[in-house]
Image: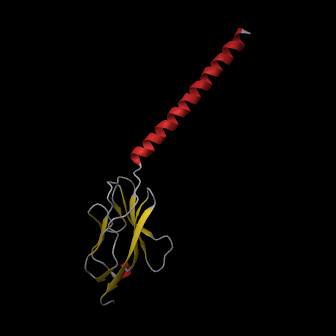
Amino acid sequence: MYVHVFYLHSLWRCQKCVCVFVCVLAILFQLLSSICALEITEITEPPQNTVALAGSPVHLTCGIVEDYAGYFEWRAFIAGELGGDQIYSSPPFHASSPRFHQQGKYGLEINPVEWRDAGKYTCSFLTGDVRASANIVVMGQFT
């Protein structure tokens, strides 16, 4: 009888510990989520449609008021591609081509722009699912 009572008492204490532990984890998760995940509500400097001469640099802006440390990316939608190709992401900065450069905090530079770069470009802040797009038209002689 003593063994069973001790076992039940230990089991009860263990269940209370697990419940407290789960509650503490839930509170910590909520605190970290509210501290780390800055909700972006609006892009204040959206990229602008651009006409560029082949071989020249192109600059696209994407500005926000908040200081954002979360995931950010640019995607290119060339020739009607679904989903687009990720051309750079941050942090840390990663470009899919040496012609793509980060300009300022969230801007994109393509240098030199080529005819195959013509298309729609979208900047995205994944916290809050905020994005803006612009089109690049490339002109010049094509060989």
Placement of 112 over or under 124, stated as above or below: below
Q: Residue at x 33, y 65 (%)?
A: 44
Viewer-proximal residue among 102 and 127: 127
Q: To which quarter of the image does residue 58 belong?
A: bottom left
What is the total number of numbered labels drawn onto the structure image?
0
List x then y, in percent, for residue 117.
Answer: 36, 78
List x then y, in percent, for residue 9.
Answer: 65, 16
Q: In the picture, which quadrant includes the C terminus?
A: bottom left
List x then y, in percent, for residue 96.
Answer: 37, 66
Q: Residue at x 46, y 71 (%)?
A: 84
Placement of 91 over or under 131, stated as above or below: above
Viewer-proximal residue among 34 and 18: 34
Is 93 placed left or right of 21 in the picture? Answer: left
Viewer-proximal residue among 87 and 11: 11
List x then y, in percent, for residue 115.
Answer: 35, 83
Q: Residue at x 44, y 70 (%)?
A: 85
Q: To which quarter of the image does residue 142 belong?
A: bottom left
Placement of 17 over or under 94, stated as above or below: above
Is 111 placed left or right of 122 in the picture? Answer: left
Q: To which quarter of the image does residue 64 belong?
A: bottom left
Q: In the picture, which quadrant includes the N terminus?
A: top right
Placement of 122 over or under 12, stated as above or below: below
